[in-house]
């Protein structure tokens, strides 16, 4: 079952904090190759989980906005 291979990440903020710590460690460049590879793999899993959490939150917000009937939906982006 593919679900059991996914990391168990229940808290977005905790995952983001862990991801930031991984990035800091990797940017220092003082890790062994093996440690860097493990961090890279974990970082990818955390990034995917954070992305999924954000997409779920966006869907929930869209439902709330649609339910209120009075607000227009504007795409979130980089200000373009």
Image (tube, helix red, strand yellow):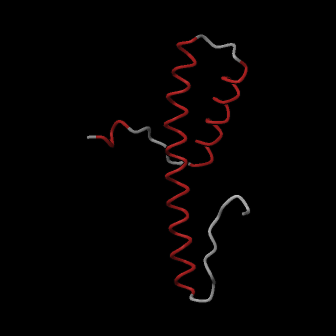
Q: Quadrant of residue 21?
A: top right
Q: Quadrant of residue 65?
A: bottom right
Q: Which part of the image, by quadrant, shows the C terminus? A: bottom right
Residue at image location 52% in from the left, 20% down from the top: 37
> Count of labels shown?
0
Residue at image location 53% in from the left, 50% down from the top: 51
Q: Position of residue 58 (x, y in %)?
A: 55, 64
Residue at image location 71% in from the left, 24% down from the top: 27
Going by the image, does 68 lie left or right of 30?
A: left
Q: Is residue 74 above or below residue 40?
A: below
Tell which residue pokes out farthest to the left in this image.
Answer: 1
Q: Is residue 43 above or below residue 33?
A: below
Given residues 8 and 54, the one toward you in this image is 54
Tell which residue pokes out farthest to the bottom in this image.
Answer: 70
Q: Quadrant of residue 68?
A: bottom right
Residue at image location 51% in from the left, 69% down from the top: 60
Q: Position of residue 38 (x, y in %)?
A: 51, 22
Q: Which part of the image, by quadrant, shows the N terminus? A: top left
Tell which residue pokes out farthest to the top in this image.
Answer: 32
Q: Is residue 10 above or below residue 67?
A: above
Going by the image, does 69 lie left or right of 23?
A: left
């Amino acid at each position: 079952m593919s679900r059991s291979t996914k990391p168990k990440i229940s808290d977005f903020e905790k995952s983001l904090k862990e991801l930031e710590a991984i990035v800091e460690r990797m940017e220092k460049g003082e890790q062994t190759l093996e440690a860097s590879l493990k961090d890279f793999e974990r970082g990818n899993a955390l990034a995917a989980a954070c992305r999924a959490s954000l997409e779920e939150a966006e869907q929930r917000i869209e439902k709330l906005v649609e339910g209120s009937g009075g607000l227009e939906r504007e795409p979130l982006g980089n200000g373009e």
